[in-house]
Amino acid sequence: MRYLPHTSRDIDRMLQKIGIGSMDELFEPIPKELQCKEALDLPPAKSEEEVEREFARLTAMNRAGEFVSFLGAGQYPHRAPRVVDHLLRRSEFYTAYTPYQPEVSQGTLQAIFEYQTLMCLLLEMDVTNASMYDGATACAEAALMSLRVKRKKHKVLIARSVHPEFRRVTQTYMVDQPDQLVEVGFGADGKIDTEDLRSKLDDCACLIVGHPNYFGVLEDLPALATIVHDADALLVSTFSEPLAFGLIPGPGRAGADIVCGEGQSFLGDPNFGGPSLGIFSAGQKNVRQMPGRLCGEATDADGRKGYVLTLSTREQHIRRDKATSNICTNQGLMALAATIFLSTVGKEGIRSLAKTNLSKATYLKKKLAGIEGFSLAFQGTTFNEFVLHCEKHAPQVVQERLLEKNIVAGLSLEDDYPELNRHLLVCATEIHAKEDLDRLADELAAL
């Protein structure tokens, strides 16, 4: 659709309609010092052909195809089957709005229902909502939900090994609340420090722990579930790499009460950090405290199957004091993409893909650990990323020198973890060929 601005005649007619003589009179209530009288410093207008040529010139400056990247840290490079994009571009999907009227929204509602079902199977949980904005907001909503469930508790524990952005967004959500957000440290194996955890359990509503955590390390969820449940608290398991659950048990089986995280891995390429998909699951007994909404399957008066919004818990739909969240919508299109991805790949396909990710990351981890000047920071079991200790050169030096070789070596952890100021977070997925992994190892060895 092309943008067609209003003509001078259009503007005059609208001003006349509302009884105003000029644009200056329309903006009279705005203080003079805030009004911009000068023309905007913009280049001259261009024709459509000129704009297309300019964008082509800018596109040619990109060198993304020349580089091999080992970045992960919450946004993972994966390949999505072509059918995902093909179906997603059907107009009835990408133009669909909130399904307030079930009689005209059956396709959207069924897609949501299928999404919920697939996520429950993947995470081994009872109920999944119709999705959240992203993993960070899902984590924050899990903290608030835990405080509602455990009404007499006023403290939320969050592992320091949880994604830094998840922690910061959760802190923002709770900044004006009387409840506390308290961090729990991690040990030499990259897992949560259970002794530190036990010392902070008093008045605790929940523990939020990453699985896999930000370092790629798998936590001992059953043991953590026992610890927090004995303290009458909830276990919240969060994640940024859901593909791991194609191989490891879902957090629900391990005793998690709430499971939430980022679903970008089911959407294909990271695309400069988006779009995102917030996944949120919980046990049946706490379903009425969940944020967002649920789609359910029902039958009409004639016994025909249909889909409806079964639970909508924001203040627009129910009394404000009964609302669980001000989350206004769901990532419908991204949830549909994840649904198509999971349906296309299937149970065995997800398992095979997860195995491939694990094997490539394990191969790379062993190769890099054998290079003089580098070692593994944590010995815990990891999925598709791990922390590399740079003993000989600072991480920034490693990154700069490998960037000259068209290799993005990984992410320096210093900004978020000052104590890990000589560490890189390195990721490998199915997109990396063996030659890519060997090339990274060879270039590190040559430093």
Image: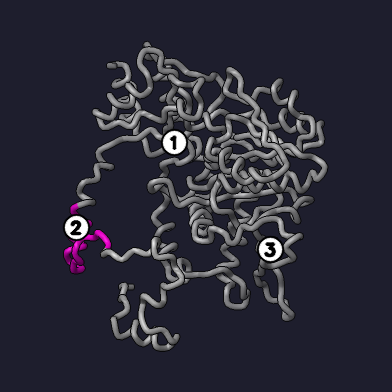
Position of residue 6 relative to residue 228, above or below, is: below
Q: Nearer the viewer, mark 1 or mark 2?
A: 2
- On-image quarter of the N terminus: bottom left
In the image, the segment drawn in magenta is 40-57
Place of residue 208 in the rendered image (x, y in percent of width and height, measured from the top left): 66, 36
The one of 198 and 81 positioned closer to us in this rendering: 198
The one of 123 and 196 positioned closer to us in this rendering: 196
Amino acid type at image mark 2: Glu
Kind of element beneath mark 3? loop
Residue 123 showing in the rendered view? no
Residue at the disc numbered 1: 72
**Gap between marks 1 and 2 measured at Cα:** 32 Å
Residue at the disc numbered 3: 315
Residue at the disc numbered 2: 54
Residue at x 22% of width, y 51% of height: 58
The one of 18 and 350 positioned closer to us in this rendering: 18
